[in-house]
Amino acid sequence: MPVHPEKAGRLWTQWTLNSLPLTLRVNGIYQGSQWNNSAATLATDDTVRVDAIATYRALPKLDLYVRGENITNNRTGGFYARYTPGITVFGGIHLAF
């Protein structure tokens, strides 16, 4: 497959603070160079992207979170992509019933 990188990997770590109901998780994603079109004429560079999430347990069934994707602002295009968004930040709640 021309658009599949030969090398790729993911590494993550997670910390839970004992003094606060807070969990931090960081993901690192590596993707080797690949062809960005089916004709195998447009190559991309190796790329590393970092994502992170912080979750606060406000109540036993209610979590508040903030999540950042691509916090290193990596702009290397992926599968047939000409534009890759930069840093993206989300916030929200998880509610268990």
Image (cartoon, rainbow, N blue to C red):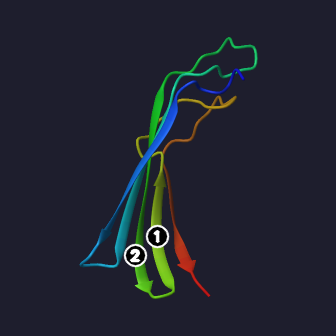
Pinpoint residue 76: horizontal percent, then vertical percent: 53, 29
Which amino acid type is shown beneath numbered disc 1? Tyr
Q: Which mark is residue 35?
A: none
23 is higher (above) or lower (below) than 7: below
Disc 1 + disc 2, Cβ < 8 Å: yes
Q: Evaluate whether residue 75 shows in this view.
A: no
21 is higher (above) or lower (below) than 84: below
Pinpoint residue 15: horizontal percent, then vertical percent: 33, 63
- Image quarter in which the C terminus is found: bottom right
53 is higher (above) or lower (below) than 78: below
48 is higher (above) or lower (below) than 3: below
* Residue appearing at x 69%, y 14% in the figure: 40
Q: Which residue is mark 2?
A: 56
Label 2 Cα crowd, 10 Å radius (few <14 / some 14-19 / many 20+): some
Label 1 Cα crowd, 10 Å radius (few <14 / some 14-19 / many 20+): some
Pinpoint residue 43: horizontal percent, then vertical percent: 60, 16
Q: Quadrant of residue 5?
A: top right
- Lower sequence index among marks 1 and 2: 2
Q: How many discs mark residues in the rendered view?
A: 2
Residue in the foreground of this view, choosing between 61 and 67: 61
Residue farthest along the right direction in this orientation:
38
Q: Evaluate whether residue 97 shows in this view.
A: yes
- Image quarter in which the N terminus is found: top right
Residue in the foreground of this view, choosing between 23 and 69: 23
Q: Which residue is mark 1?
A: 65
Pinpoint residue 85: horizontal percent, then vertical percent: 56, 41
* Residue appearing at x 64%, y 19% in the figure: 35
* Residue appearing at x 71%, y 20% in the figure: 37
Which amino acid type is shown beneath numbered disc 2? Tyr
**Mark 1 falls on what kind of element?**
strand
**Mark 2 falls on what kind of element?**
strand
